[in-house]
């Protein structure tokens, strides 16, 4: 299977914004995030885009597996890539929300964001975001990994039913999806570095899957989601008042739309 990636075009678009930028398309690797983190810890801090046609050990948030590289009718069923760069924001809070907002704005108006870092179509997950950082000397290197389901996939063993971008954009393929997402993403990250998340709070609310719904968190918090604050923390109205959920170890699932009860 030969996939025609527009690597040179992507480089030409991004390199003026990120001097020293490189683009690599790999047939197979364990994880694009893991590889860029390895390179950063070895002192390779240049901005880089790493795209994998197949991952053998893809990772999602909280250490969950992320399948990638599945092939259907000679096309990739998903897009998996990581963008690595040195960032120096005054406040890192809300970066995953800024990234997610850029992704949904680039792909389709029907896509929503499930705090803190998932893209959903209706009640199904379409994409995930994993952000990791490495401190090297006096700088911090950020690796932003994104996995997008392009074609329908088997839901066996998945906690959340999967959605596919082809349901909304029938002719989409991996190179086209990458071309749609990458440049706006770089712009969004650089704006975040300068201005933080606060200016994105209202745009985020227009895509907020959880807003107004009863949610339950793994730390035991139960209440009605009320959007996010200026730092990207989830606001939950509980019997004890308004609570802020910001820990990276907190998982939030929306309640059932049919019965209004909180899901686990």
Image: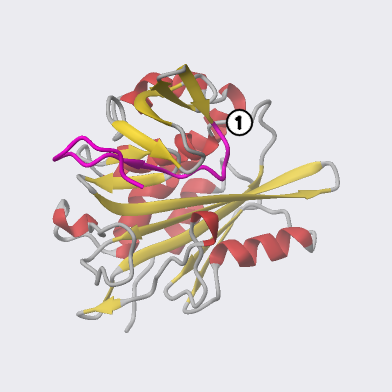
- Judge whether 110 appears above or below 165 on screen: above
Which residue is rendered at x = 38% and y = 37% of the image? 216
Look at the image and tell me whether residue 56 can be seen: yes
Q: Nearer the viewer, residue 77 or 9?
A: 77
Look at the image and tell me whether residue 6 can be seen: no
Q: Quadrant of the N terminus?
A: bottom left
Q: Nearer the viewer, residue 229 or 53?
A: 229
- Judge whether 127 appears above or below 202 on screen: below
44 sits to left or right of 100: right
Q: Nearer the viewer, residue 173 or 80?
A: 80
Where in the figure is residue 119, as x and y percent of width and height?
A: 33, 46
Circle 1: element type: helix
- Judge whether 122 appears above or below 224 on screen: below
Which residue is rendered at x = 30% and y = 53% of the image? 125
State the predominant SS element of the stretch in magenta: loop
Residue 254 within the segment the image draws in magenta: yes
Residue 48 within the segment the image draws in magenta: no
Q: Which residues are magenta?
A: 246-264
């Amino acid at each position: 299977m030969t996939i025609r990636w527009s690597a040179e075009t992507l480089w030409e678009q991004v390199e003026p914004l990120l001097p020293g930028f490189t683009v690599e398309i790999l047939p197979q690797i364990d994880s694009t995030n893991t590889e860029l983190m390895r390179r950063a810890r070895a002192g390779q801090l240049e901005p880089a885009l790493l795209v994998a046609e197949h991952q053998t050990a893809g990772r999602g948030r909280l250490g969950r597996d992320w399948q990638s590289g599945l092939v259907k009718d000679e096309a990739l069923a998903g897009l998996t890539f990581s963008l690595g760069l040195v960032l120096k924001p005054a406040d890192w809070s809300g970066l995953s929300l800024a990234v997610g907002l850029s992704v949904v704005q680039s792909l389709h108006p029907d896509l929503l964001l499930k705090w803190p870092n998932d893209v959903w179509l209706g009640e199904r997950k379409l994409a995930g975001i994993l952000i990791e950082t490495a401190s090297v000397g006096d700088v911090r290197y950020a690796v932003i990994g994104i996995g997008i389901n392009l074609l329908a996939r088997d839901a066996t063993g998945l906690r959340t039913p999967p959605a596919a971008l082809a349901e909304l954009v029938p002719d989409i393929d991996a190179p086209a999806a990458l071309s749609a997402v990458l440049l706006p993403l770089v712009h969004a990250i650089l704006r975040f570095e300068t201005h933080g998340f606060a200016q994105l709070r209202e745009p985020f609310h227009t895509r907020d899957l959880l807003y107004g719904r009863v949610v339950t968190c793994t730390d035991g918090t139960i209440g009605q989601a009320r959007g996010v604050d200026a730092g990207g923390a989830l606001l939950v109205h509980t019997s004890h008042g308004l609570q802020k959920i910001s820990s990276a170890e907190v998982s939030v699932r929306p309640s059932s739309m049919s019965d209004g009860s909180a899901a686990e």
